[in-house]
Amino acid sequence: MEAKFILLTIPFLLGIYIQALFQKRGFPFNDIGFTLLGILYVGFPFYCFTRLGFIDAEFNHFIPLGFMILLWTSDTGAYLAGRSLGKHKLFERISPKKTWEGFLGGIILAVLVSVFLAQYFGTIPQWQWILVAVIIAVFGTLGDLVESMLKRSLNVKDSGHILPGHGGFLDRFDGLLIAAPLVYLLLLLVN
């Protein structure tokens, strides 16, 4: 990231601190912490996701599109395998319906789809698509668990009402929040 963009964050941070000074609240550092965590938790991953389109300097929509296809394929594979084969709970305290069988089903389906993406999208070699699929399936599940933990700690069922029946907008992208920076880092290192 260029230094001028980093410097643009200074007035933003100062604004957060100044606002906290003027608010008459009991725990101003909690407000500052929630604000900064929200930016890091959501903003930075989406920045990395958008940068996936520019891995080769010129915009290429196939990598971000492939990322989303793999993310949703992994979720679908996990759901189908978990519903039909699931017996062993993955992390019952945080997400009682997730199972190890579903987790493995999500990885397997994402890897299978990544082979097709390599054939039809190209852009990166097949071994990279497969590695991207594994990262998305594994760390997408972690992102889902972290978001479930966040909702449980705040005692909310849904993270919003924009998408009724889907648990909120954040539930559609919770896997992206941890996986996108890792996929971006991987593709930067290998390309």
Image: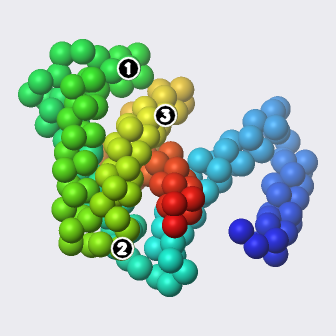
Residue 161 visible in the shown view = no
Callout 3 amino acid: Val
Viewer-proximal residue among 149 and 69: 69
In terms of secondary structure, where does tag 3 sit?
helix
Q: Residue at x 25, y 32 (%)?
A: 104
In the rendering, at what x and y percent does residue 49 appear?
49, 63
Q: Residue at x 52, y 50 (%)?
A: 182
Q: How much space separates mark 1 and mark 2, taking CA atoms? A: 36 Å
Residue matched to label 2: 123
Residue 68 figure quarter = bottom left
In terms of secondary structure, where does tag 2 sit?
loop
The answer to whether 172 is drawn above or below residue 57 in the figure is: above
Task: Determine whether label 1 and label 2 are within 8 Å by CB.
Answer: no
In the rendering, at what x and y percent does residue 47 appear?
57, 64
Q: Is residue 139 left or right of residue 126?
A: right
Q: Earlier in the sequence, mark 2 or mark 3?
A: 2
In terms of secondary structure, where does tag 1 sit?
strand
The answer to whether 23 is drawn above or below residue 13 in the figure is: above
Residue matched to label 3: 146
Viewer-proximal residue among 106 and 15: 106
> Can you name the residue that lies furthest to the left here?
84
* Quadrant housing the N terminus: bottom right
Q: Earlier in the sequence, mark 1 or mark 3?
A: 1
In the rendering, at what x and y percent does residue 91 appear?
38, 20
The mark closer to the camera, 2 or 3, is: 2
The answer to whether 97 is drawn above or below residue 55 in the figure is: above
Q: Earlier in the sequence, mark 1 or mark 2?
A: 1
Callout 1 amino acid: Phe
- Label annotation for residue 91: 1
Q: Residues within 10 Å of mark 1 (few under 14, many from 20)?
A: few
